Amino acid sequence: MTLTAYFNWLTCSEFHLLTTTL
């Protein structure tokens, strides 16, 4: 897993958490 892919996954998971919280 590359660094860019890791950050991309991190952003997607954070966005998913935000949408589920809202």
Image (cartoon, rainbow, N blue to C red):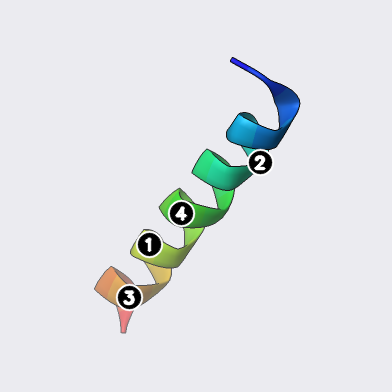
Q: Residue furthest left?
A: 20
User: Label 3: which residue?
Assistant: 19
Q: Examine the image and state in which quarter residue 21 appears.
A: bottom left
Disc 3 secondary structure class: helix
Q: CA distance from mark 2 to mark 1?
A: 15 Å
Question: Which residue: 43% across, 50% down?
Answer: 13
- Measuring from the top left, give residue 17's x and y in whole percent: 37, 62
Q: CA distance from mark 3 to mark 4?
A: 11 Å
Circle 1 residues within 10 Å: few <14, some 14–19, many ≥20: few
Q: CA distance from mark 1 to mark 4?
A: 9 Å
Relative to 8, is 19 on the left or the right? left
Task: Residue type at mark 3: give it.
Answer: Thr
Q: CA distance from mark 2 to mark 4?
A: 9 Å
Task: Residue type at mark 2: give it.
Answer: Phe
Circle 2 residues within 10 Å: few <14, some 14–19, many ≥20: few
Disc 3 vs disc 1: Cβ atoms closer than 8 Å?
yes
Question: Which residue: 67% across, 20% down?
Answer: 2
User: Label 1: which residue?
Assistant: 17
User: Label 4: which residue?
Assistant: 12
- Measuring from the top left, give residue 5's x and y in whole percent: 60, 32
Instruction: Name the mark nearer the viewer: 2 or 1.
Output: 2
